[in-house]
Image (tube, helix red, strand yellow):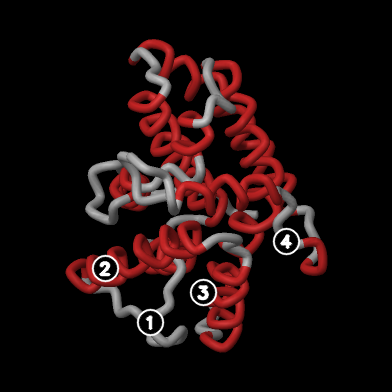
Amino acid sequence: MDTTITDLALLRLMHLSSAALPIGGYSFSQGLEFSIDNGTLKTPEQIAHWLSEQLQQSLVYVDLPLLKRVYHALLTDDLTKARDYNDWLLACRESFELHQADTAMGAALAKLLPNFGINVPDFANDQLSYVSLYALAAVNWHIPYQQTACGFLSAWLENQVAAATKLVPLGQTQAQKLIHQLQPALITAISQADALDEDQIGMGLPMFGILSAHHETQYSRLFRS
C-alpha cells in the first residue's frame, strides 16, 4: 500500500483535522456529558477507559471500515457504493443525538468544501455523514487512506478530550497526557478495522447509545450530544 504523502497533502490533512475547522465538532460530546453528569465517569483513568472502549467497539467496527469503503468508492467514482456506505453509517447511529451529530457535522462540511473547489455529490438526499464528507475531502486532496484514517481518529480524540477537559474537568496537562496515552491505540485501531470483512461491520456498545439518549433530556448541558 502506498502511504507516501506530499507536503501539500499533509497540510490539507492538518487543515481537515483541525479543531478550528468550522464544522462544530466541539459541540458534540457523544454521550460523554451525561456519563460525567450522572457520576459514571469521574477521573482521567475512567475517561481513558471510556474512550478506549468507544474506539475499540464503535470506531473500529463502524467509522473506520466504512470510512475506508467510502474513500475507495469515491476514488473510483462509484457513487452508488458511496451512497450505500453513507446510509450504512447513518443507520449505525443508535440515538437521535448521535445521528444528529453525524449529519450536522456532515452538513457543515458539505457547505464548506465547495469553497475549496470540491463538488459535493448529492448521493444521500442531504443526509450526509461527516465520515463520508471527510473521505470526499481526502480523496480530492490526494491524501492516502492511511493518513486519512489517522487524521480522522486524531480529530475525534482531540474533540472528545476537549469535551472531557470542560466537563470533568481535566487540567490542560492531564488532557495532553491523555491524548499522548491514547495515540498508539489509534494506529492499532486502523489495522484492526482494515482486517474486518464487510459482514463484521456494526456497533457493539448498547450502553453508549442508552447514555447518549438520556442526554437528550438532561436538564442542563453544554453540548448538543
Q: In this view, does 71 lie to the left or right of 49?
A: left
Kindly report the distance in space between the C-alpha atoms of the residues bearing marks 1 and 3.
21 Å
| Residue type beneath disc 2 | Leu
Dot 3 falls on a residue whose secondary structure is: helix
What x and y, as percent, mark residue 82?
A: 55, 79
Report which residue position mark 2 lands on.
113
Sequence-wise first label, 4 or 2: 2
Q: Secondary structure beneath disc 2?
A: helix
Which of the two discs, 1 and 3, sits closer to the camera? 1
Determine whether 218 is above or below 87 in the image: above
Closest to the observer, 131 or 7? 131
- The residue drawn where x is 33% and y is 15% is 172
C-alpha separation, residue under disc 2 versus residue under disc 3: 17 Å
One can see residue 155 in this view:
yes
Q: Mark 1 points at which residue?
A: 126
Check disc 4 and report its element: helix, strand or loop: loop
Mark 3 highlights which residue?
75
Can residue 139 be seen in the rendering of this structure? no
Residue in the image at 63% along x and 65% along y: 92
User: Cα distance, mark 4 to mark 2?
Assistant: 28 Å
10 Å neighbourhood of mark 2: few (<14), some, or many (≥20)?
some
State the residue position of label 4: 202
Q: In which quarter of the image is the N terminus?
A: bottom right
Vertical side of 132 occupied by 76: above or below = below
Decide which of tag 1 and tag 2 comes sooner along the chain. 2
CA gap between label 3 and label 4 equals 23 Å
